[in-house]
Amino acid sequence: MILIPSCSSEIIGTDIMQLARKASSMYSVDVIPVLADSRFLSSKFGGIYGLMDSLICRMRPREMEKGTVNLIARGFFGSARDIPRQVMDDMFSMFGLKVRTRFLDFCSLEDIEGFCGSEYDIQIADTMLDDRICERISEVTGRRRALLLEQPSGLCKCIEWAERLANYIGTPRTELQRIVQTLRSGFDAIIEEFKPILSGKSVVVFCIRHRDLTWQIETMKALGMDILKVMYLDSTIDDNTEPPAPIPGVETATGAKVCDLREFSSRNKIDVVVTNDAYRVGRTGLCWTVLDSRYPGLYGVRFWLQTMRDCMLIGKGTWEEGL
């Protein structure tokens, strides 16, 4: 049993160490106290790093099972589960790899103690906390530092993902080419499915903050959609990302406002606005759809296009009218 401090216990100064000793004595259970972590705002994160560290220290040497991989991400706690899990399992299976343990997901202590039985470790979220967890795993177990390889969306990102994984595990070039061709064929099939509906439609991208729109632009161009403009919203929140890279053949504007979108729509026919600012764009009366997909891989492309198609079929009416 692991005893983790909460906001309340810290405010009243609860002695976690003493409680753990008392509980261990009373119930003959190994109670592990997790002390507050000052580097991550203490109990603001529920002692998450202390919990992770306690579990990492229980990882034991194991005989390695070839062709297996561990996935590491704090975000497993809140991620949509079944479909993303299956998509990533399928992508690793293209390389002959089987996902063995997700840390920290719904794991048993036996799973965690057997962590070192996998051949490879992959960090699938690029955050400071995930970096710290992976560094600690390497420090405690002596394993190679996990490869940072975020879950990809879109064809270009899936190919980049495949190339980086192939380089990490030493996949032969001919095998990588076969995998890339499989990805391209899958993407082409999705494009052919939606092309009759979306080809020729005019679209504006209206985006909060500077974002990498590579896979979205790639997908819309493959469909034959007319990308009229990419507009980056003038935000009051500091944007520490790099300025957006120019998109060949697409007009790009920074420091945009909703009134700029309204003015542009008065001069141009817009079939759909692709946006991550649904609240403000929705009030313009323009048909809109989401900027990102909730799912990774090519499944995410299909889900995104299905959402775009459905939004365009509903049009500008109230949400009840489209049901």
Image (spheres, rainbow, N blue to C red):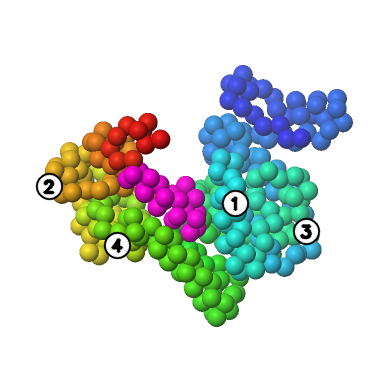
Helix, strand or loop for disc 1: helix
Q: Residues within 10 Å of mark 2 (few under 14, many from 20)?
A: few
Sequence-wise, which precedes: disc 3 or disc 2? Answer: 3
The one of 169 and 10 positioned closer to us in this rendering: 169
Q: Nearer the viewer, mark 3 or mark 4?
A: 4
Identify the mark at residue 61; answer none if there is no mark.
3
Alpha carbon of mark 3 to alpha carbon of mark 2: how far? 66 Å
Q: Position of residue 213 (x, y in %)?
A: 34, 56
According to the picture, the residue beneath numbered tag 4 turns out to be 224
Sequence-wise, which precedes: disc 3 or disc 1? Answer: 3
The one of 180 and 6 positioned closer to us in this rendering: 180
Sequence-wise, which precedes: disc 3 or disc 4? Answer: 3
Q: Nearer the viewer, mark 1 or mark 2?
A: 2
Q: Is residue 308 left or right of residue 264?
A: right
Disc 3, disc 4: CB below 8 Å? no
Q: Position of residue 233 (x, y in %)?
A: 26, 43
